């Protein structure tokens, strides 16, 4: 007999917050020494975000990657929206590098999930000419 499978309780809504996420697309080394990189920032949360910092790195920042560029999206980026843009990585190092990016790297925007704020991008290379 299965008559003890009921549970009840009060469900409380959590705080509303932005949830920023980043994806890196194709890189273009045709403009070396300043290759370009397509970037998409998403707001999967329930509140808008603005003054969104995106920091690009040469190598994995968790392993000591070197910051390459800071780019600010003024916003607002509304809940459920995304924006795609292309950045120029000025004075890119003359070696093969895997580019990474973090959105909100200084944790200045209240978010419900900071675990999706980093992305690994393509391997780019600019050689001296």
Image: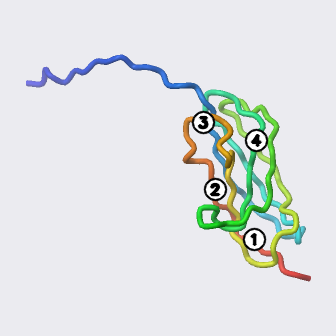
The residue identified by callout 3 is: 111
Quadrant of the drawing holding the N terminus: top left
Q: Residue 51: name its quadrant.
A: top right
Along the line of sight, the residue nearer the viewer: 111 or 116: 111
Compute the Cα span from label 2 to label 3: 17 Å
Q: Residue 30: name its quadrant.
A: bottom right
Residue 57's spot in the image, x, y percent? Answer: 72, 62
Residue 128's spot in the image, x, y percent? Answer: 88, 81
Image depth: mark 4 or mark 2 in front: 2
Q: Mark 1 touching mark 4, by CB under 8 A?
A: no
- SS type, badge 4: strand
Residue 55's spot in the image, x, y percent? Answer: 74, 53
The residue identified by callout 2 is: 119
Image depth: mark 3 or mark 1 in front: 3
The residue identified by callout 4 is: 83
Name the outermost residue toward the bottom: 129
Compute the Cα span from label 3 to label 1: 31 Å
Which mark sits nearer the N-terminus, 2 or 1?
A: 2
Q: Mark 4 touching mark 2, by CB under 8 A?
A: no
Q: Mark 2 touching mark 1, by CB under 8 A?
A: no
Which residue is at a point 64% across and 67% down the rendered structure image? 64
Compute the Cα span from label 1 to label 4: 23 Å
Q: Mark 2 touching mark 3, by CB under 8 A?
A: no
The residue identified by callout 1 is: 124
């Amino acid at each position: 007999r299965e008559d003890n499978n009921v549970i009840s309780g009060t469900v409380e809504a959590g705080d509303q917050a932005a949830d920023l996420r980043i994806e890196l697309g194709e890189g273009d080394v045709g403009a070396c020494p300043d290759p370009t990189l397509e970037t998409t920032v998403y707001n999967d949360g329930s509140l808008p975000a603005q003054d969104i910092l995106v920091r690009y790195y040469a190598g994995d920042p968790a392993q000591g990657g070197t910051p390459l560029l800071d780019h600010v999206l003024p916003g607002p980026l509304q809940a459920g929206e995304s924006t795609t843009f292309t950045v120029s990585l000025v004075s890119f190092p003359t070696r093969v590098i895997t580019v990474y990016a973090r959105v909100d790297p200084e944790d200045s925007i209240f978010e419900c999930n900071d675990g999706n704020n980093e992305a690994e991008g393509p391997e780019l290379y600019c050689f001296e000419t």
